[in-house]
Image: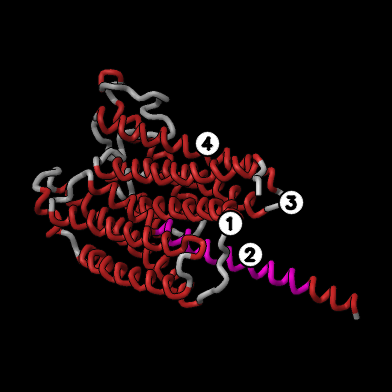
Amino acid sequence: MRLKPKIKLFRRLSFITLVSVYFLILVGGVVRSTGSGMGCPDWPKCFGRWVPPSSADQLPANYKDIYAQQRAEKNTRFTAYLEALGFDKLAEQIKNDKSILVESSFNSAKTWTEYVNRLVGVIVGFLIFATFLASITFIGTDTKLFIYALLSLIAVGFQGWIGSVVVSTNLLQWLITVHMLIALLIVVLLTYLVVQVRKSKWKSLITTFSNAVNITLLLLIAFSVIQIVMGTQVRESVDMIADQMNNGSRETWIEQLGWVFYIHRSFSILLLAAHIFLVYQVSKHYGNQGNLMTNTLVLLIVILLEILSGIVMAYFAIPRFAQPIHLLFGSLVFGLQCYIWLKINMLKWNNLFRFKQKEEIQNVSYQVHS
């Protein structure tokens, strides 16, 4: 069947947008691993400019006071929002945390690393907006595409605002976790679009449905979110240790991490075993219908790569290059799990719809002949 141009465009655009989000996650990991999160003390500009300075000579002598004051004003508005939502205790903690207003000295490398991160973020934002515009043509024919594209646009706008608050609060730890969770939500929404617009492309539709595989996948998705959250907590501990030791003696950092690290490490073995079980379940119930077995094996390989990157960090003094890679693999695991789950369920719903249509036609035919 020949596809209409708008379907082709949307397929390519939704896939490119999803890939760009993963690239942004990788770049964000580089920012964290290099300690460049506060390379730009303001947002959306960097040191009040759309193109950041290359040296401290281009800044006023009291630039630290200027940007500390700007952040204080923004935090006042943010804590007011928290209080309005009933988070009085959290708002009070932010107000009393004096470290939030400590301004770092200008560092050209960190500034430009953060600036590149923001440029990539802007590109992702434009791609999501373009995806939304392209989805408008499906209103009435496949309205779900429009709804999920709109939700993606709203989510990326909220993500941008949260990113600005992360900067104004001087990388407040729990906000970084929220920032990551919103990124995962965007991955889910875009993955839905990718699957929804491609379901007609799969020639061999799934003819059976396994509750065991479905439940296993849902549990694995939940476990992956827990693992990612624990990973962000481990990362926060690493940041604190790095700061205390002035980024020296990296070989001693692992032994200083708390119980969350050991749970995070042990949990990865449990996840590996669970994914091996998933491969068995998919092989048993589906085979390679709709390329499900291929998708699941790719997922298992990414799990192994994620564990390998974790081993590299644990036994080789947490090298900077391994940290963003570990984050990327963790996000890919989550995305692939969602992709497989959506694929199975969309094909199931599609077959169920077709079966009901056939049944209705047969009933009408029977009534006519009667």
Q: Earlier in the sequence, mark 4 or mark 2?
A: 4
Q: Residues within 10 Å of mark 4 (few under 14, many from 20)?
A: some
Indicate the quadrant containing the C terminus: top left, top right, bottom left or bottom right.
bottom right
Q: Which mark is residue 49?
A: none
Q: Is residue 50 left or right of residue 155?
A: left
Q: Is residue 221 above or below residue 66?
A: below
| Marking on residue 126 | 4
* Amino acid type assigned to the residue bearing label 2 in the image: Asn
Q: Report whether 270 appears left or right of 225.
A: left
For badge 3, the amino acid type reads Gly
Label 1, label 3: how far apart the Cα atoms are:
18 Å
- Secondary structure of the residue carrying tag 4 is helix
> How far apart are the alpha carbons under marks 4 and 2?
32 Å
Q: Residue at x 30, y 21 (%)?
A: 60
- The numbered mark at residue 199 is 1
Q: CA distance from mark 3 to mark 4?
A: 25 Å
Q: Position of residue 177 (x, y in %)?
A: 36, 54
Q: Is residue 221 magenta?
A: no
Q: Are marks 3 and 2 in contact (CB under 8 Å)?
A: no
Task: Tell me which label, 1 or 3, sits earlier in the chain.
Answer: 3
Does residue 101 appear anywhere in the picture?
yes
In the picture of the structure, the residue carrying the numbered disc 2 is 350
Q: Nearer the viewer, residue 370 or 306?
A: 370
